[in-house]
Image (spheres, rainbow, N blue to C red):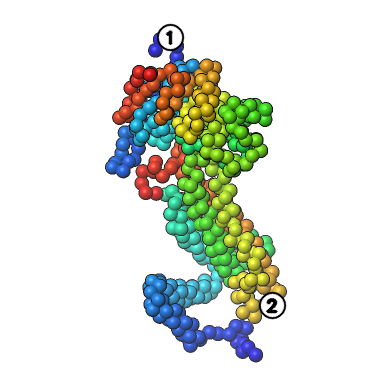
Amino acid sequence: MGDVTALLEARDLTAILPGDAGDVRVLDGIELGVFAGEIVDVVGPSGSGKSTLLRAIARLLPGATGTLLLDGSPAEHFTPPAWRRAVALLPQKPVVVDGTVRDNLVLSWRFGVRRQQPMPDDASLAEGLARLGVDAALDRDGSRLSVGQVARIAFLRTLLGKPRVLLLDEPDAALDDASADAVAAMTAQFANAAGAVVRVRHHRPDGIASRRLRLANGSLVAEEVA
Amino acid sequence: MVPQSAGGVVQIGWQGLALATMFVVFVGVVSIRMALGITKDLAIATVRTYAQLIALGFVLRWVFGINQAWLVVAIIVLMVLFAAQIIVKRSPDAPRGIFGGAFVAMALTGFIVTFAVTGVIVQVKPWYLPQYVIPLAGMVIGNSMTGIALAIERVYSDFDARADELLALTALGATPPEAAHGSMRDALRAGLIPTINSMAAAGIVFIPGMMSGQILAGADPVTATGYQIVVMLMVAAATALGSLVALLLTYRRRFTADGVFLEKGFRRQAH
């Protein structure tokens, strides 16, 4: 891969999960390198293991084996929370916890891993919401949000943690076109600022991906970008 | 006028027991007629009540006669063992291997709270006086067992219900204690609510068991009140302490070494 180190690298990533008819090798020695500035889309049929792949990269998959490197440093050099702060997964099902929109956006500052990191102020929270087209005050109760609002708040929450790699599991599945465009714009901006992105998407290509990989039978195969 | 025996207690004879049994037989007949499907359980429960309580009577009489410290301690350990077993059985959603945690939690609360009452508050002499220690230990262990079982059962079913939230929190950098905090808090609350409710209703809705017993035995109701208040407060303390210890000792079993919550789909066996 030339003279530059991939920001994120996965080698021989393997996951065997219990299935209905015995164990299934969902990930079979995955090799993946993502460079800073890249957006890699992972496609494939439902159940092919796309979400499993993202979880494995975030060290959130029980039983996964293989090597993960961030900027050349092996994952073992990080505590699991520190790894996930740097390699942040936005899970497929967006979640709001009890509390206001603000509580949800700064949720991860309750955790020890972010003790040294300055918490974003209300102005930057409001700006993020506005850019994503979320018309909700910071004091709005989290239970009074629409599905699309929850999805964008979960996206913003992950972005606010300033990760180096973003793993997005269908970030625009619940969004209308305008909102999906806003999420894509912020994703592209993140990549342009030397971030790396791996996305799982079902929608038609939105034009910001650098590469498209198809996950089938536990392996990744390059696809032509349309 | 209530006839009184020498000890201040009216003896219940075999006729009395037979009459009480007749009521249960009547319920059994109703159960058969209405096909309630509980006839067998009712019969077994009745026989168990007879067998266990008669055995208990003789065992306690024997223990009081021997009056030895080691025997009192051994009996409390046995009670703790059974309580831990029951807690495990009542928590079908809990992971395997929580017996140890349940046992330690029950033993800690059982011993600390019981001897705090007998040693510091009642100040029995000698410290192991079985007439005091064993019934008080039974009340502390039995009542806190219910609360601890509720808390444990609740925390694991809550984990499963909140699997998506646990994943989201962990993905944001939460450690297992940080991710589990909400479920643990709710479970502790759930375990304490029955105790708090019975404290609130005591004396208005019902006369608590220990006080009833002492009054039936001829004690002055105000003296009995003192004991009952001590016991209720101690049961509340034992439930809170025991639930907290039991949760802290066991919840980590639902997370991997990397701090990931083990959702149902990732558990290899049905546990």
Q: Is residue A128 left or right of residue B176?
A: right
The residue that disc 2 covers is: B220
Give the foreground label among 1 and 2: 1
User: Type of residue at label 2?
Assistant: Asp
Image quadrant where one finds the C terminus of chain A:
top left
Tell me which residue sits at (52%, 47%) in the image: B249
Secondary structure under tag 2 reads: loop
Q: Quadrant of residue A157?
A: top right
Q: Against B114, is A66 above or below?
A: above
User: Type of residue at label 1?
Assistant: Asp
Tell me which residue sits at (43%, 81%) in the image: B25
Residue B173 seen in this snapshot: no
Instruction: Say the numbered circle drawn on residue A3.
Output: 1
Q: Against A178, is B16 above or below?
A: below
Q: Is residue A151 left or right of residue A13?
A: right
Q: Chain of mark 2?
A: B
Q: CA distance from mark 1 to mark 2?
A: 91 Å
Secondary structure under tag 1 reads: loop
Q: Position of residue B133 (x, y in %)?
A: 59, 66
